[in-house]
Amino acid sequence: MGLNIKPLADRVLIEPVEAETKTASGIIIPDNAKEKPQKGKVVAVGAGTKKNPMTVKVGETVLYGKYAGTELKLEGKDYLIMRESDVLAII
């Protein structure tokens, strides 16, 4: 990806996937009614800690809590940086 950011310790950098614009039945969702995405792709991971090595890897798709992490804007894209413990599951 060419990002100049390396998360420290047990932190991960996640690029959220875009929110759905249409429901399964074909109804278009307006911008003000879209929910914050809870799924994203791991872009970078830290080295982990001695007690807890990292289990997520770059390129994996993960689920995370709705209000987890800190929002960042790098090179015109939105990212989230959070602790690995805020990641709920790997898809």
Image: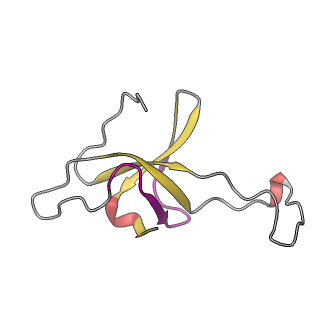
Which quadrant: the N terminus? top left
Please give left or right for residue 73 compared with residue 24 in the image: left
In the displayed structure, would residue 3 be above or below residue 91?
A: above
Chief secondary structure of the magenta portion: loop
Q: Nearer the viewer, residue 66 or 56?
A: 56
Q: Residue furthest right?
A: 27
Q: From which residue to which does the magenta span run?
A: 57-71
In the displayed structure, would residue 79 be above or below residue 48?
A: above
Which x, y percent locates residue 29? 85, 60
Which x, y percent locates residue 87? 40, 65
- Identify the residue at horizontal 41%, vertical 56% (top origin): 60
Number of callouts: 0
Please give left or right for residue 36 compared with residue 28 in the image: left
Please give left or right for residue 39 compared with residue 60 in the image: right
Does the segment drawn in magenta span residue 79? no
- Identify the residue at horizontal 32%, vertical 54% (top origin): 57
- Identify the residue at horizontal 41%, vertical 50% (top origin): 59
**Colour convention:** secondary structure
Does the segment drawn in magenta span residue 63? yes
